[in-house]
Image (tube, helix red, strand yellow):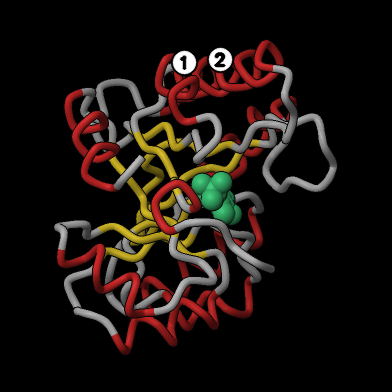
Amino acid sequence: MNYSEIKESLSEKKVELVAVSKTHGVDKIKKLYDSGQRIFGENKVQELIEKKDLLPQDIQWHMIGHLQSNKVKYIAPFISLIHSLDRLKLAKEINKEARKNDRIIPCLLQVRIAKEDTKFGVPPSDIHSFMQKYKERNYSFIKIAGVMGMATFTKDIAQIKAEFDQLTTIFETIKKEHFPGNEDFRIKSMGMSGDYKLAIECGSNMVRIGSLIFGSRNY
Ligand SMILES: *Cc1c(COP(=O)(O)O)cnc(C)c1O
């Protein structure tokens, strides 16, 4: 399936596409940019900042991977969305660097919906206390725009569906408790190349697709 087919089917459903360009060169990214894509996702800070300098400045860069506190300063001046807010310590650092840059950084709360210990995120059972503590700190340079999650790497469709459904339920609970009537809290970032259709059926409105657009990666 090619980019324009994916793009078309997503825009019909009002689902935003993050083109995950990690490991791919700037030439490939520029090609997709020329086809109209503006949102690109990377999972490593170093790789992201190297590519950003070589590409058009109106690209909206999303940080989708695990983020170390000491690297926030490199992306704070320009990052459009951080999908991987999963610790209070990281929130503190993002708020500090956002203030320095006199901007508000939109972030998604990453939730660990997968049943693997390899995946990051706040465990569902800790979300309530995380949000409680987060609120008390009044971080005025962060805007929580929604949630992000990655399903378990498995062929068991029922399990993946249950995990996506769980993220949608968590989104609705957080919205009701902490952001009622606030349109800024609206993003459910879930779904990758292998499971994005299922994710959309479960309520996703932002998918992160890499290999289906760019081809497979050789790590
Ligand atoms: C790599 C990556 C993706 C995209 O994966 P594909 O299977 O290539 O679509 C999505 N989300 C995150 C967090 C990733 O690291």
Is any part of residue 208 visible from this angle?
A: yes
Would you identify the image quadrant in which residue 50 lies?
Answer: bottom left
Question: Mark 1 or mark 2, which has the lower sequence index?
Answer: 2
* Depth check, front residue: 13 or 96: 13
Q: In this view, does 115 lie to the left or right of 166?
A: right
Residue to which mark 2 is pinned: 165
Q: Where is residue 131 in the image (x, y as percent from the top left)?
A: 57, 36
Q: Position of residue 34 (x, y in %)?
A: 15, 67
Q: In which quarter of the image is the N terminus?
A: top left
Q: Which amino acid type is marked by label 1?
A: Cys
Q: Which amino acid type is marked by label 2?
A: Asp
Label 2 packing within 10 angstroms: few (<14), some (14-19), many (20+):
some
Q: Quadrant of the C terminus?
A: bottom right
* Depth check, front residue: 32 or 1: 1
Is any part of residue 136 visible from this angle?
A: no
Please tell me which residue is depicted at 26% across the width and 32% down the height of the picture.
Answer: 10
Q: In this view, does 182 lie above or below 28?
A: above
Please tell me which residue is depicted at 34% across the width and 30% down the height of the picture.
Answer: 205
Please tell me which residue is depicted at 63% across the width and 79% down the height of the picture.
Answer: 70
Residue 202's tag is: 1
Most extreme residue toward the front is 1
Asked if marks 1 and 2 touch (Cβ < 8 Å), the reply is: yes
Residue 152's tag is: none
Would you identify the image quadrant in which residue 140 lies?
Answer: bottom left
Q: Where is residue 104 in the image (x, y as percent from the top left)?
A: 31, 62
Please tell me which residue is depicted at 31% across the width and 74% down the height of the picture.
Answer: 78
